[in-house]
Structures are given as C-alpha cells and as structure tokens.
Image (tube, rainbow, N blue to C red):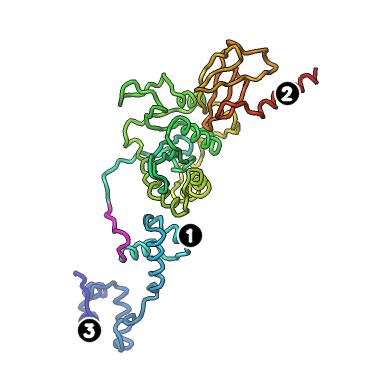
Amino acid sequence: MKKTLLTEEVFKMTFNKAYDRYKKRKMTCEEAADFLGVSISTFYRKRQRYEEDDFSGSFDRRLGLASPHKAADAEVVFLTKLFEEKYKAFSVSHFYEFAKREHKVGRSYNWVRNKLIEKGLVQKSNRGGKHRLRRERKAMAGMMLHQDGSKHRWISSLDYDLDLIVTMDDATSKITSCFLIGEEGTFSTFQGLYETILKEGLFCSLYTDRGSHYFYTPEEGGKVDKHRLTQVGRALRQLRINHIAAYSPEARGRSERMFGTLQNRLPQELELSNIKTIEEANRYIQEVYIPRHNERFCIKPADLESAFTSWADAEGLKDILCLEEERTVQNDNTIRYKGLILQIPENKHRYHYRKAAVMVHEYFDNRLALFYGQLCIGKYDANGKLDKNFVKEITSSEKKTCKHK
C-alpha cells in the first residue's frame, strides 16, 4: 500500500479502524502496519499506548517539542559567516576539513553541506560523469611512480602562472615530491626524483608524458626513441629505473585527477595563509600541505610490502641526477660552459689538464662540478666561481700527503 502523509486526527481514525480489525483477527500486525503505512515496530508502540491510555493527550509525543538534534541559530550563522568571509573559494569537503580542525565544528559533513546549500552559498551538485574504465593500481608501493607538471595560477597574488611538479606513487596515491617552479623541464624532473629517492628509496618504474625533456620523439605524436636518451633518460638508466611513456591523456588519468584535487585546494590554502612568493609557497607545501594531503587521500596498497630500495648517498645521487656535458680543457686549464669560464685549480693528481676530456655536471640547484673520470677536479657556484670549501679540501689533503711522506 502506498504510504501517505496523514494529519494527527486522520491518523487516529485510521489507527482505530486498523486496531479494530486486528483485535477481531481480521488483520495481522504486518497487515495493520502496512495499512497505516508505518513499520511493524511503530504499530507495536502505537498499539501499546492505545491500550494503556487510549491516546490521551497528543497522539505523537514529539509534537510541539524542539528536536534535540536541531542546531541553534547562532551555530548556523557562525558556520555560514565563516564560509562567506574566509573560505568561499574552498570546496565543501575542503571547507569542512578546516572547519573541524581550525574552528572545532562538530557537525557532520552532510549537515554542513546541507546548511550551505539551504543558504544558497553552494550549488547542489549533480551526481555522475562520463563513463571511465578503471586501470588497476600497482600492487605495491614503489612499483611505479607518476611524475607530471601542471601550469596554473597557484599563487593568486602573482600576475603569472607557475608549474607545480608532482611525483606520486601509483599504488597509494602518496605524493613523494611536490614544489612550484617557473617552468617544467629537466631540472624540475631531477629535483622531484632526488627528493623522492632520498625520502622513499629507489623504485621500479617512472610513468610520464612524452615531453621533450623526458623523451626524444622523431615524429610528432609518434612513438618515442628509447635508444636516443635525453638527460633524464640517461639518469634513469643509470639508476635502473624503467621509463614508461604515456600515449594518451586518458593514460595519465590518475595524475590528472590528482591535479584536479590540487587545483581545488592548494591555491585557496596559499591565499588563506597570505603567501605571496614561490619560496614561501614551497615551504608551506613541504611542511603543511603534503602531510595533510597524504593523510587525507592516501590509500592502502593491495600488498603491504614495499618495492622501494633505500638510498643513502645524497651526493652520489646528485651526480647522476644532473646535466652531463663533455668539454676539452684549454691551454690555461679552463673550460667554457654556457658562457662561463671554469678554472681548474691546481692539484696533486696531474701537473695540468690541457687537452684532457672532462665532464661538466650541472645540478638542479645550478651549482657546477668538473670530473676527470671518477675524480672531481672542481666545484663551482652558479656564476662559475670556485667553491672555497673545495679549494680548502684540496689544500688540506695535499698537506696531509706531504706530511705522510
């Protein structure tokens, strides 16, 4: 029977009829409940009250009483004012997290969302979206990582967009590295890999788009050349990390959805914290945002074992994750690199390095170093000036050698 909303008087009359038929055994409890459009337990309660006091007073004792769950008007005013004045750019779920953590709001998420909808502060969203085919995650953390960049107005006070470089684990969605930079490229890739490997360890494979700093692609839109390596490709091969190229936007769906979440949260938090520079933003991302994000969005992998392998040699890692270019030393023991003149200091290993082939390493922090084989023969700042600490190391080691002799 179709349930209808009845007034108290009509319900009393209907109940009397159902109760009378029940007492005459013409109707079971289940049929009487169905007749009234209520549950069996409700019919039991109403029957007991009817037999006790014939519904003296109100048929429903809750009528005229305020619900114990009803929020005070002041609480609703506080919540809506808080959203309007401070968090209007936030999504509802993002606002709810801050309201609970920063303002001790104890209500449920649905309650908060409904109040904001009632006040016209947010739109009720329509469920659904385009049909997607799910790609299964890797079973263990460290089996495959994604790296990508997203250009966006991450800092609202700046009049230009920045690239956010994110490295994330496929199995858990954990962000292992995240920072803002002016332009995505080889050095941003190296920085993301460096931070990830030092923090988590070596991993099995890296999944990226086919950007020119990741791969050489002979034909536009064609397959990548896995034999002609970029600087990134060379470094990954040295680390024995398999490099996988994505051939469609859909193939990078997991990282694309990650950036959707970040674009809906990170700019709002940076603006809320009155952050205006890249340096301040990166500090906030490292110290505040990433821990919160990972706690909120990470999932457990199918296999709790880890495929990460620890790596402790930070300096050795930098000498892999760097630009490498060969140069020939000139007669005055200098080499030229990107408009800089790098002077090789005197050392005990050779009288001079004229005509020798040396390798220049340029690191993602713009420092430089010169290598003769495995031997480091010079360290320089971003302007090509010799590192004073390196000169001191050479001098002290030579003195020790002479003293020993």
Q: Amino acid at mark 2?
A: Ser
Cα gap from disc 2 to disc 1, whole angstroms: 56 Å
- Residue extent of the magenta highlight: 119-127
In what element is the residue under mark 3? helix
Badge 3 is on which residue?
9
Quadrant of the image for the C terminus? Answer: top right
Q: Amino acid at mark 3?
A: Glu
Q: Residue 260 is drawn in which quadrant? A: top left
Seen at 24% across and 82% down, the residue is: 8
In this rendered view, identify the residue nearer to me: 64 or 2.
Answer: 64
Is residue 91 inside the magenta stretch? Answer: no
Crowding at mark 2 (Cα within 10 Å: few <14, some 14-19, many 20+): some
Q: Amino acid at mark 1?
A: Arg
Question: x%, y% of residue 320?
Answer: 54, 26
- Prevailing secondary structure of the magenta residues: loop
Question: x%, y% of residue 257?
Answer: 36, 43
User: Does residue 143 lie above or below 285 as drawn?
Assistant: above
Residue 397, numbered label? 2
Is residue 122 inside the magenta stretch? Answer: yes
Residue 101, numbered label? 1
Which numbered disc flags the more N-terminal residue, 1 or 3? Answer: 3
Which numbered disc flags the more N-terminal residue, 2 or 3? Answer: 3
Left or right side of 307 for 53: left
Label 1 or label 3, whichever lies nearer to me, is 1
In what element is the residue under mark 2? helix
Quadrant of the image for the N terminus? Answer: bottom left
